[in-house]
Image: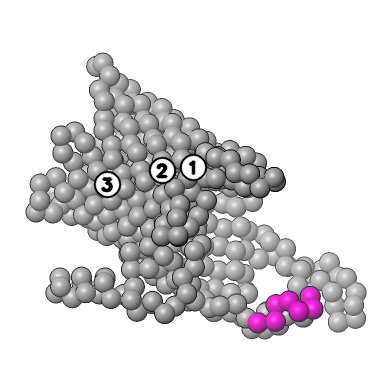
Amino acid sequence: MKYKVVLLLIAFPLFFNAQSFRNYSNEFLNVGVDAAALGMSKAVVATTNNVNAIYWNPAGLVGIEDYQGSLMHASYFAGIANYNHAAFAMPIDENSALGISVIRFGVDDILNTTELIDSQGNIDFNRISLFSAADYAFNFAYARKLIFKDVKFGVNAKIVRRIIGDFASSWGFGFDAGLQFETNNWKFGLMARDITTTYNSWAINVDEFNKIKDAIPGQNQELPETTEITKPKIQLGVAKDFRIGRFFNLQTEVDLNVRFEQTNDIFSSKVGSIDPAIGFQLNYDQLVYLRLGVGNFQYITEFDNGKSLSTQPNFGVGFNYRGVQVDYALTNIGSVGNALFSNIFSITFDYSFFR
């Protein structure tokens, strides 16, 4: 049976080889969850070990000892877009665990002006309606210790649902897989996202499309493509903890985010690109946390066609008391230029403290 699974993982991408890949597909799944991780610029692939490992690296779920839950809310673009996340995880036994999570990223109350002008050519504001554009992801994760010492493996199956009002909607599915390994106080992590590619199939509302088909001469004459295939991505991480005195501990991690496409990342070629991320977490007796991170190293083209390097710094704090951890992160979703900073809050519950 296991050989059939391996064969499926190898053959699945080949099945779509003739299809066109999208360089930017399901991008809402790259935003990230958990204010603690975002405060460290997402450099947590090697160290994540709670319920939020469902997203960052499902192998880390093996580290939980009891029921855990997590909630997160973030507003982007000055509150125009809202990102919400909820997750639950539980151990099956000493060597395995499972988890489920849901993500919603949406813009609500968008003005629909496709019927603003009536058949007589008059503007009628009463014909304006509202709609939402929302993306959903449902994740189902399983993790287990392997027979090799200190090696953990996890897999995440995800279902993607995307809705643009009454205009279009899609269903998609894909898989992620991750590994974690620890030796001599060094921690290593590997996360392969969309390992079999993630496939989205769109359904376009033809009646709604026809309303805008001739709004601008020569524009919107053909239906958009109805297939999206997301390329695989890889995240590599290495981390080490440093004990400082009796009560302080410093966690450091460096991650490499690899895309198989040419981008503006600091290391980029026709084969692929690499975007490093560095994160630090200083905690006092596992009660108070201070986090710093820097990532998103991008070359930006200036108006004079020159290039400059931009980075994204992140900051975060956290408090943990009797199984309830509240985290905050200040970050933005672009470079340090004109992007708007966002305040991100998350809360994590560990039921073991209530027993």
Q: Which residue is drawn at 40% across and 68% down?
A: 198
Q: Say left or right for 256 vs 125.
A: left
Give above or below for 125 relative to 29: below
Magenta part of the chain: 215-222
Q: Which residue is drawn at 18% across and 75% down?
A: 4
Specify the label residue 189 is tagged with.
Answer: 3
Is disc 2 surrounded by few (<14), some (14 to 19) or many (20+) residues within 10 Å?
many
Is residue 217 part of the magenta span, yes or no? yes
Task: Tell me the amino acid under the disc marked 1.
Answer: Phe
**For marks 3 and 2 on the same chain, the one whose residue lies earlier in the sequence:** 3
| Percent coordinates x, y for residue 188 in the rendering | 24, 43
Q: Do the residues labelled 2 and 1 touch (CB within 8 Å)?
A: yes
Q: Name the residue under label 1.
A: 297
Which quadrant of the figure contains the C terminus? top left
Task: Tell me the amino acid under the disc marked 3.
Answer: Gly
Q: Which residue is drawn at 27% across and 54% down?
A: 178
Q: Tell which tag, 3 or 1, sits nearer the viewer.
A: 1
**For marks 2 and 1 on the same chain, the one whose residue lies earlier in the sequence:** 2
